[in-house]
Image: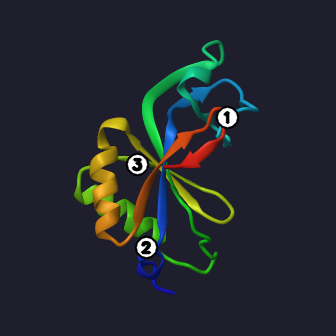
Amino acid sequence: MDPSDFFEGGTVIVSAATYAVVKAERGDPDAFATIRDENETTVVVEEERVDEASAVEVERGWKRLTFEMVLPFELVGFLAQVAGALAEEDISIFALSAYSTDHVLVREDDVAAAAAKLESLGCTVERAGTTDDGNYCRN
């Protein structure tokens, strides 16, 4: 399986929300992601939802780019190609994988450059918006 096949015609959604990556004393049930290992707990949460009482360190100003495609477990090198392409543009990422797909967080100031680079790989990049009821929709 060639990772490039997934870029061509694939869609990447840029979140409407801006996120914070938080080193925290505890998890957050409302977070986008909580990662616990033997050394620390990391919470990825919308900026306005940071639990300051639990926060040890906070990195604000991240946008989530979601690869709206099912990525099989047998696929090798997809995230490596994404990371490498964005590294060529000097864009730092915070990568997360879900069961079926991948997400990368990039600094808010890097979204335009990241979108352009992903489009050069064959992806369609769309910005998420919100409806009146707070649900996400594609613009």
- The correct choice, above or below, for 70 with respect to 22 in the image is below
Work out whether residue 88 or residue 36 is closer to the camera in this orientation and state it: 88
- The correct choice, above or below, for 72 with respect to 129 in the image is below
Check residue 31 in the rendering and tell me which mark sits there, or answer none.
1
Task: Give the residue type at disc 3.
Answer: Ile
Looking at the picture, the colour scheme in use is rainbow
Q: CA distance from mark 3 to mark 1?
A: 19 Å
- The correct choice, above or below, for 1 with respect to 85 in the image is below
Name the residue located 63 percent from the left edge and 37 percent from the top edge.
Answer: 39
Work out whether residue 126 or residue 99 is closer to the camera in this orientation and state it: 126
Q: Position of residue 90 (x, y in %)?
A: 24, 50
Task: Give the residue type at disc 1.
Answer: Ala
Q: Residue furthest bottom?
A: 1
Question: Do tag 2 and tag 3 residues touch (Cβ < 8 Å)?
Answer: no
The local crowd at label 1, few if under 14, some if 14 to 19, many if 20 or more residues have their Cα within 10 Å, is some
When asked about the image quadrant of residue 86, the answer is: bottom left
Q: CA distance from mark 2 to mark 3?
A: 18 Å
Disc 3: which residue: 93
